[in-house]
Amino acid sequence: MEWGINILFSITVDNATNNDAMLKFMIKRLKNKHYSILGCKFLHVQCAAHILNLVVTEGLKGLGACVSTIRNVVKFVRSSPARMAKFKSCIELEKITCTKMVCLDVQTRWNSTYLMLSSVEKYEKVFALLEEDEGKHFVAPSSIEWETARLFVRFLKSFYDATLKFSSSKNVTSNSYFIQLCIIQNTLNDSICSDNPILSSMSFDMKTKYDKYWETVERINLLLYVAFVLGPRYKMKGLVFWLRRCNEADWAKFIEESVDALLNRLWDQYNLFHGEDGLSNSDVGIQSSTPTFSNVDDEDLEDQDVKYLKVFSQHQEETESEYKSEVERYLSDRCEAATQDFNILLWWKVNASKYPILAEVARDVLAIPISTVASESAFSNR
């Protein structure tokens, strides 16, 4: 009310109890308003970064000894300028060209632990040399601990990359939610079958926590599946493809039908918002034109068959569009090619004339933040 917001599309928060109470209050106040989105049924979006933090933290409990040893040697090196200078001299003696210096983690933030392990594992020989110089005052990690650290750096990279994707404030994040879940799920399933008992046990614990929040559709806001489908490089075909690869066929079919129904319901509501200004499917198609036969120069005669062919093609597209809704046309059109620098917002801006109502749905769905990290950082004193 203070900010003059008439339509509240979604609220992204973590799983704190007070947030649940706040959401119940908001839904009660908003769901009967004319401009509520589908009765506020999809108002709550859980912070993906918060859930991922819980998942990885659960797994890191089994890494206590290895992480503690490495954390202690990093503390030793960073405890004084003299020790850091000695560490750098050992780097020169070992002729290591890496410029990335060791960093100390914050124990309550797993991503900082990942960064610490990834920065340290390149300096195994340096720490061994430092142990020779320092004697009993310094104990370097064992070869087994270094091997374990490298293994977990490779394993945790998928989770670190997913956190960066979820927490981005300069790119659309909602459309990447589903594919990141697929990557995380496959990583965990593969690691559970690992020959390394520590990695296997750690992955099992993480998968248990993952299933608590992400196993069933009731725990995932369906709007985030819609966001994935509104990515023109995947659409519904891509959703179904990865659902069937990562889940049972019945469950994949249920999600497909639910997402299709939700996308059509969203289109219907946004079309209603337009009222008399709403656009019908016929407004979107290519306008037909009738060729004229007067004032035709001789030099243009050879192009007349081409003109007639174009008129027929326009008529054919127009006729086909009469039997397809805007959503059906979008989903049946060919997916865009896989390019790394694809700009999804620009694509919808360019194609807004072709899918006018759906473009407005995309504008709001793609604006959903799937993490509170950026907003929390904005209000942080640090």
Image (tube, rainbow, N blue to C red):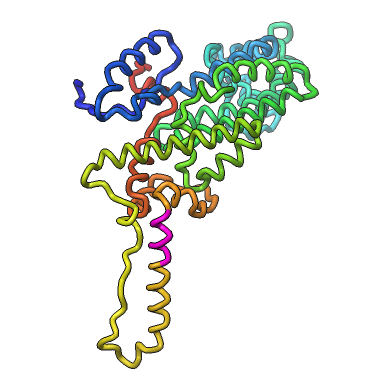
Please tell me in which quadrant of the rendered image residue 2 appears: top left
Q: Residue, x 40% and y 73% (percent of image)? A: 310
Does 348 appear above or below 62? below
Q: Position of residue 230 (x, y in %)?
A: 45, 42
Which residue range is magenta in the image? 316-323
Does 367 appear above or below 117? below
Visible in this render: residue 56? Answer: no
Please tell me in which quadrant of the rendered image residue 209 appears: top right
Q: Position of residue 365 (x, y in %)?
A: 39, 35
Q: Residue, x 23% and y 28% (percent of image)? A: 6
- Which is more toward the observer, 166 or 364? 364
Q: How many numbered marks are there?
A: 0
User: Residue reaching furthest front?
Assistant: 323
Q: Position of residue 300 (x, y in %)?
A: 35, 87
User: Residue reaching furthest top?
Assistant: 136
Q: Is residue 64 left or right of residue 278?
A: right
Q: Residue, x 40% and y 49% (percent of image)? A: 325
Please check the rendered image and state whether residue 111 is part of the magenta-colored stretch, yes or no.
no
User: Residue reaching furthest bottom?
Assistant: 298
Which quarter of the rendered picture does the N terminus lie within? top left
Q: Position of residue 171 (x, y in %)?
A: 42, 37
Please tell me in which quadrant of the rendered image residue 123 appears: top right
Q: Is residue 154 left or right of residue 231?
A: right
Does 362 appear above or below 287? above
Please check the rendered image and state whether residue 317 is part of the magenta-colored stretch, yes or no.
yes
Q: Is residue 218 left or right of residue 193?
A: left
Q: Is residue 149 left or right of residue 307?
A: right
Visible in this render: residue 256? Answer: yes
Main structural element of the magenta stretch: helix, strand or loop? helix
Which quarter of the rendered picture does the C terminus lie within? top left
